[in-house]
Amino acid sequence: MPLQISSMMGPCARPQGAKLRCLKGSRGLEGRQGESLSKTTDAAELAALQEKIKTLEVNFQEAQHRIAVLHVVHEVAGSLTSELNLEPLLRKILVAAVEVMNASAGSLILLDELTDELVFAVIEGGGGENLKGVRMARDKGIAGWVATHRKPLIVDDVNKDNRYYQSIADSFDFKLTSLLCVPMISRNKLIGVLQVLQSKPDHYFGDLDQKLLTTFANQAAIAIENARLYESLKEERDRLVVVEDEIRKRLARDLHDGPTQLLASIIMSLSFTKELIKRAPEHALDEIDLNLGVSEKALKQLRTLLFDLRPVILETQGLIPALEVYAERLAETDKLNIVLTVEKEFERLSPKAEVAIFAVIQEAVNNAKKYAQASQIDLILQPDESQDTLTVLIKDNGLGFDVHKVKARYEERGSLGMINMQERSSAINGVFTIHSEVGQGTEVILTLPLHENLLSNSKEM
Ligand SMILES: Nc1ncnc2c1ncn2[C@@H]1O[C@H](COP(=O)(O)OP(=O)(O)O)[C@@H](O)[C@H]1O
Ligand SMILES: [Mg+2]
């Protein structure tokens, strides 16, 4: 994206602000209009007046030039919002900043909120490519000062500034003299810092540069936030596609292993019964009884599958009745002892909260069934009005597992269960935790704010 703006910066290598200064002792221009110049005999005063006009002309040109630069900054900043891919956006921001500021080089440094570190995301000019990805503490160096104080900073001679971080500077193969560093803030949140550097001697950044770059950096910060939001939406969409695929595969497997097998055996048995009626009708009744039992089993399996797919009772009667039916079914089909305890009555929750809690319970119970070889699962609901929380506990007495180990290599597993439980919990502002130890069983805990998730407070009503 080559920007044709550098040439505009020509005479303003050190902008000092486009102030229109008045010469001391001289009168205003308007006052002069009515007067006859022929009356002015004082040559010195004329010279002073000419000097003043010259200064005004220079200042006027400078102001015009600044307006043009501002216009470019505005245009560039506006065009940033249409770039939704993060990597190219970051580069666009930095290239534009370096060009607009007529700088020799620059870097865009992002704050990693998880580690509270600053990360060099893009480097422009100065052969500093090896700095890309380098991390430093949030308060290190000049960038760290700007990030911590959330204030812009001009440094005319970096070698005289003890905030200058030499070991980082050494990786930046560049003879740096002065710099301008500004914070990138969006909705009061620090996104990172933007830094432009000068290698030319006697080229300094001024107050106006600082103002321009600050405005630009804040627009850039909004664009970065948008792009991040867009990327997380894309990830979410991809994840939904995977989840849907998983559900379809599981449904196909369950249908194949359960009801399909039973139906096949019913058909075989029915043709056998037909023969029996012809040849030994006295045995036909027993065969029909046998068939009835198998048919009932098939029906139960199909109903369980339907319930897992869409527990209609959750929508019609709410969470507690749905959990009661769920526990009964599991006790029948899986011979699992599921104990549901509701410690205190509470108002019905919003459909969103009920569906989320039910989904977390389903996943936790499925895990306990699949991996834990548990003989008992406790489902406990603890409403606490004084704390405004509802705690949902799913405890199994099974094998347990090393949570850290599983989480550390989670991405390699291709699993989604824990992520789903985590996201379902966040969607209702809940906190999801899991405690487990090998040999000690597993405890899944979801704690959500009670009041805001009540049906009576829900907009979905
Ligand atoms: N209740 C549990 N008991 C024992 N191991 C469990 C339990 N819950 C989860 N795990 C372990 O954690 C892993 C990740 O679970 P999850 O995220 O649901 O993915 P998936 O079920 O697809 O493997 C499981 O593969 C299993 O090893
Ligand atoms: Mg699972």
Image: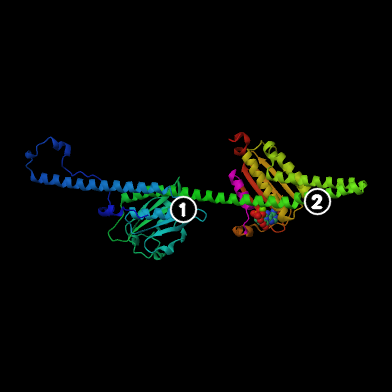
Q: Residue furthest front?
A: 278
Residue 18 visible in rendering: no
Query: Where residue 16 sits: x, y (%)?
Result: 27, 50
Foreground tag (1 vs 2): 2
Please rate how many residues cluster around mark 2, counting C-alpha atoms within 10 Å: few if below 14, some from 14 to 19, many from 20.
some
Left or right of residue 127: residue 407: right
| Residue underneath mark 1 | 86
Q: In the picture, which quadrant includes the C terminus?
A: top right
Q: Secondary structure at mark 2?
A: helix
Q: Is residue 420 above or below residue 40?
A: below
| Residue underneath mark 2 | 265
Q: In the image, what residue type sits under mark 2?
A: Ser
Please rate how many residues cluster around mark 1, counting C-alpha atoms within 10 Å: few if below 14, some from 14 to 19, many from 20.
some
Mark number displayed over residue 354: none
Please state which of residues 33 and 155 is positioned toward the viewer in this rendering.
33
Left or right of residue 269: residue 227: left
Marked residue nearer the N-terminal end (1 or 2): 1
Q: Which residues are magenta?
A: 413-430
Q: Quadrant of residue 458?
A: top right
Q: In the image, what residue type sits under mark 1?
A: Leu
Left or right of residue 241: residue 330: right
Q: How is the image coloured?
A: rainbow
Tell me what residue is drawn at x 71 percent, y 41 percent.
Answer: 322
Q: Secondary structure at mark 1?
A: helix
Q: In the picture, which quadrant includes the N terminus?
A: bottom left
Query: Where residue 113 sits: x, y (%)?
Result: 50, 53
Residue 206 visible in rendering: yes
Left or right of residue 284: residue 458: left
Query: Where residue 386 sits: x, y (%)?
Result: 63, 39
Count of all numbered marks drawn on residues in the image: 2
Answer yes or no: do the residues labelled 1 and 2 have beta carbons within 8 Å? no
